[in-house]
Amino acid sequence: MKALILAGGLGTRLRPLTMRMPKPLVPLLGKPLISHIIDPLPAEVDTVILAVSYMKDALEEYFRSHDVGRKVILANEDTPLGTGGAVKNVSRYLDDTFIAFNGDVICSIDLNDMLRYHRTHGGIGTMSLWKVEDPSAFGVVSTDARGLITEFQEKPERDKAVSNSINAGVYIFEKEILEHIPNGVVSLERQVFPNVLDRGLYGYGFSGYWVDGGTRENILKAQRVLLDLGGGKEAPELIKEDATICGSNMLQKAHIRGCRIGPHVYMEDDVLVSKGAEVADSMLLRGALIEEGARVRGSIIGPDCVVEKGRKVINEILARQ
Ligand code: GTP
């Protein structure tokens, strides 16, 4: 079976970090976002197709140097074709039922169970659904008693939303879906889903966690969720001198000295946090330097960035451009 991951977006909401690093390679607790999708794929998935465009060379290089245990095909779009156009563009690789993902979804979905559901319901596709309080920033669906989606609204006004079940960005499609995607730049959400409801598009709800990793707040939220689920650890090479560490964190081969770290901090190799500094709920990427007395909270500090002495960085993304 093939799995298709949409990984060609510009990632504008994560700028400036994504000026030099495509969103699928943004690290989440020691591995790129995209590996959080690839690793738990069902065993029957032997081939992963990545629909890429923005910074495709970086993705190519990553998969050349990392074996993810399955065949990986990178399908390039010279200009981004949108979520639907990206699916159509890989038609030649799709032969049967396939799984498709928005490349920035971090969730606990059980894909084997979703496949069973899809096979018993027998529609053209199954869309994963997640419940939220305010659905207005998402695709919203209503379903009937059998799970059949009866209405699909993309980003409705809050008081016009037909439910609080949203499109969670993981799908199982029959190959027939390709016949309903026109050529060119196409949005699955706006131009395809509303038009295939009569072919049988089912909704599959799940529980656990779901985060759309497209923003700073959400990536840090995913980091908190995974750390609280037991993802915290300290590398044996971590150098600690008189540092206070609170809560759950993942600290790699860094150097922390006379500072306060945590909770919910991810720190990569060669990070240095100096005396009197405080870091919480943040990601410090390789080679970041936090100088004396600086405070970092709710932030992503990109590779080799410096937070100068005494500076406060709260709810920001810092990255070299
Ligand atoms: P923002 O610019 O911050 O909105 O991010 P984005 O460009 O990634 O867009 P969005 O988060 O809406 O995209 C959802 C998923 O679809 C992401 O995994 C994107 O990589 C992917 N995606 C969006 N547009 C395209 C496209 O034109 N081609 C391909 N191949 N993937 C896309």
Image (cartoon, rainbow, N blue to C red):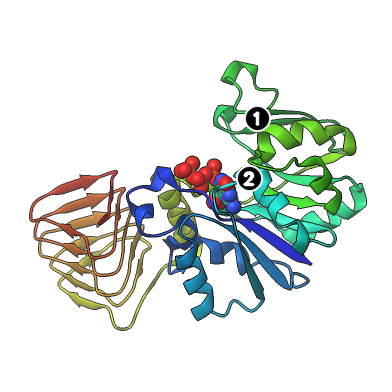
Instruction: Name the residue type under label 1.
Output: Asn
- Marks 1/2: CA–CA distance: 23 Å
Name above or below for residue 27 compared with residue 11: below
* Left or right: where 129 falls relative to 95: left
Front one among 22 and 116: 22
- Name the outermost residue toward the bottom: 236
Front one among 281 and 153: 153
Identify the secondary structure beneath mark 2. helix
Instruction: Give percent across and percent down for residue 281.
Output: 33, 53
Camera-near label (1 vs 2) is 2
Name above or below for residue 220 compared with residue 151: below
According to the image, label 2 marks what residue? 83
According to the image, label 1 marks what residue? 164
Identify the secondary structure beneath mark 1. loop
Disc 2 C-beta below 8 A from ligand 1: yes
Residue sitting at x 80%, y 48% = 178
Mark 1 closeness class: few <14, some 14–19, many ≥20 residues within 10 Å? many
Can you tell which quarter of the image residue 315 is in?
A: top left
Can residue 217 be seen here? The reply is no
Badge 1 or badge 2: first in the primary sequence? 2
Instruction: Name the residue type under label 2.
Output: Thr
